[in-house]
Amino acid sequence: MKKVAVVYWSGSGNTEEMAKAVLEGAKKGGADAELKRFEDFKVADMAGYDGFLFGCPATGSEELQEDYVEPFFAEAESKLSGVPVGLFGSYGWGGGAFMESWAERVRAAGAKLVDDGLAVENAPDDDGLKACEELGEALAKSL
């Protein structure tokens, strides 16, 4: 069974709720999936996984969270070539432009981006949670 890490950071709980739905989708898709917080997940930990689902809300002026997510991602980019990756997160302003730039970084790193990144405005509703499950399942099936 392929192993997937669902790694997220959440300020208000919206992205955490999304992460739990993504996790369920990955399991439904047949992966051995684990939920991790960026605060507790190091780049060295990536070696134990076949794919990743990264979640972060928009912060600042449509940026990745600066204390945990951005430093992790800057270091991890060099390890993403050929790796299946899915992205998700919430936003409250700016239309979710942070997701477009994050997805571009993942593509530039050579990762196999599943979908184009899932951005949900504010708290995920039933449709948003369903989309999260579908993202997790799609990544698991791509392994």
Image: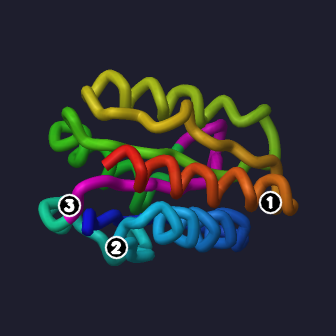
Examine the image and state in which quarter residue 112 appears.
top left
State the image quarter where residue 16 is shown.
bottom right
**Colour theme:** rainbow
**Structural distance between the alpha carbons of marks 2 and 1:** 24 Å
Q: Earlier in the sequence, mark 2 or mark 1?
A: 2
Magenta span of residues: 49-63
Note whether 110 is above or below 13 in the view shown: above
Of the two numbered discs 3 and 1 on the same chain, state the one appearing first in sequence.
3
Of 26 and 108, nearer the camera is 26
**In front here: 120 or 132?**
132
| Residue identifier under label 3 | 46
Q: Which residue is mark 2?
A: 32
Q: What residue is drawn where x is 27% and y is 29%?
A: 109
> Front-most of 85 and 3?
3
Residue 79, x across and y down, in percent: 17, 43
Which three-letter amino acid code belongs to the residue tagged 3?
Met
Marks 3 and 1 sit apart, C-alpha to C-alpha, by 28 Å
Position of residue 36 in the picture relative to residue 99 (left or right): left
* Quadrant of image for the N terminus: bottom left
> Can you identify the residue that label 1 sits on?
124
| Residue at image location 23% in from the left, 67% down from the top | 42
Residue 24 colored magenta? no
Marks 3,1: beta carbons within 8 A: no
Magenta-drawn stretch contains 60: yes
